[in-house]
Image (cartoon, rainbow, N blue to C red):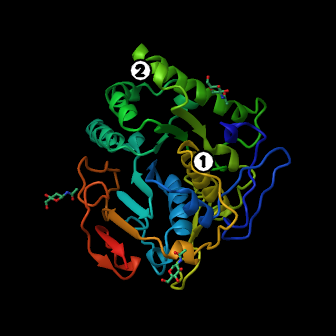
Amino acid sequence: MPWTAAGCALAVAGAVGGDGWTLVSRSCHWHVHSPAEVHEKVTKPLWLAILGNSVMRGALQALVDQLVPEAWQSFAGTEDVPGIGTNIKCWGWLDFQVGDLRLSFQDYRIWFYTEEGIRVAFERLKRVILEGPDLLVIQHYGPDVSQGQPPLVYQPLLSETLPAYFKKKKKGKIIFALSKRSPFKVALCNPQCSDRKRPHLWNHSIEGLLAKLPQDLRSSTTGRILAVDEAFVCMPLFLDGETDVPQRQASQHWHRYDRSAGPGRKVFGTAADAAGHWYLTELLTMAGARSPGAGGAGGVGGVGVANLSAKACAQCPQKPCCPWQPVPVKINHSLSVVHDMPQIKSWADLTMQSCGQLI
Ligand SMILES: *[C@@H]1O[C@H](CO)[C@@H](O)[C@H](O)[C@H]1NC(C)=O
Ligand SMILES: *[C@@H]1O[C@H](CO)[C@@H](O)[C@H](O)[C@H]1NC(C)=O
Ligand SMILES: *[C@@H]1O[C@H](CO)[C@@H](O)[C@H](O)[C@H]1NC(C)=O
């Protein structure tokens, strides 16, 4: 995929960065859709779901922050208490829909779960796949996979669910993603420049996984099961994280929150914004979304966006850590299961276990 190619950076349009950063590469750029363009292109139901850790959540929340009317209410004024979850620091399931666009996040860290936890997480994952997101992004982790070893744990699960998934979603795609890494954990410049090999090795790992699928299924995965390595934005942007360099967080967040009470962008960071827009663009492209018309008026909080109906569900536990617990197989607060929901006046009224439609 173009964005994994070494040397190919991103042009992040002013519409995206909440903090004024713009990175323009000499060799290529990535078109970032403005909120008005996105909403204009979504003319039928489209669902992006991202499963991963807090780093991946930042990418999804940056999209929510841009695309959901009055999203700031959901983030404004929340306190961050270490070890305690909120519906911002959601260690469960977060589900937003605006117009026909659905954006979901699920906490998913199989690399921390017990054997039983992995079993539950895989049952949950099967359920999510069969609910049919148009684009499902699954974060994977482990030194083995970036060395070229296939993540074979997924083979039985894919064999079981893909036939039904491909039948339900004729264009649906699943992306296995290696997350952005902390620049404080990698050798910045080792002699082999091994980082440049990582996307190829990761690509090779996923090919290894697909090679283990039954023959008839394997042919239908072409172009529909993909490998993405998000690492390449980290080096040029390594000062643009949540924590200061001296704090040297091992799990660097590429998004930051503005926790003040007033309106405005609340979740941003160029790398987080960029990752969210890669997946969003892929979703729009694969769905054959029309090119934007000449108009495209609106923008964040503009008339076109503000008029779209919006609803959300949250099932965010207070303490899934530590150790990390998988999200239960069946959850009660998801847009897949709740259809009649109370009206709420502000996203601030969406509790950690509830659904609501904004009026
Ligand atoms: C990944 O694999 C696909 C399919 O074999 C190939 O077309 C693509 O060029 C590879 N990309 C990288 C970065 O190795
Ligand atoms: C949005 O709603 C306002 C007030 O109801 C209306 O004047 C405006 O035309 C609407 N805009 C769009 C794009 O539907
Ligand atoms: C869902 O609701 C049922 C019935 O109230 C309850 O027993 C169950 O624990 C809930 N599930 C979750 C994941 O909260």
Q: Nearer the viewer, residue 42 or 316?
A: 42
Dot 2 amino acid type: Leu
Label 1 neighbour load within 10 Å: few <14, some 14-19, many 20+? many
Considering the image in quadrants, where does the N terminus appear? top right
Frontmost residue, 325 versus 267: 267
Q: Considering only order in the chain, which callout, 2 or 1, is on the residue closer to the N terminus? A: 1
Query: Label 1: which residue?
Result: 180
As drawn, the residue found furthest toward the bottom would be: 262
Residue tagged 2: 217
Residue at 26%, 50% (x, y): give it: 328
The residue mark sitting in front, 1 or 2, is: 2
The residue at 25%/46% (across/down) is 329
Q: Is residue 86 visible?
A: no
Label 1, label 2: how far apart the Cα atoms are: 30 Å
Relative horizontal placement of residue 91, taking residue 70 as reference (left or right): left
Q: Residue at x 66, y 70 (%)?
A: 18
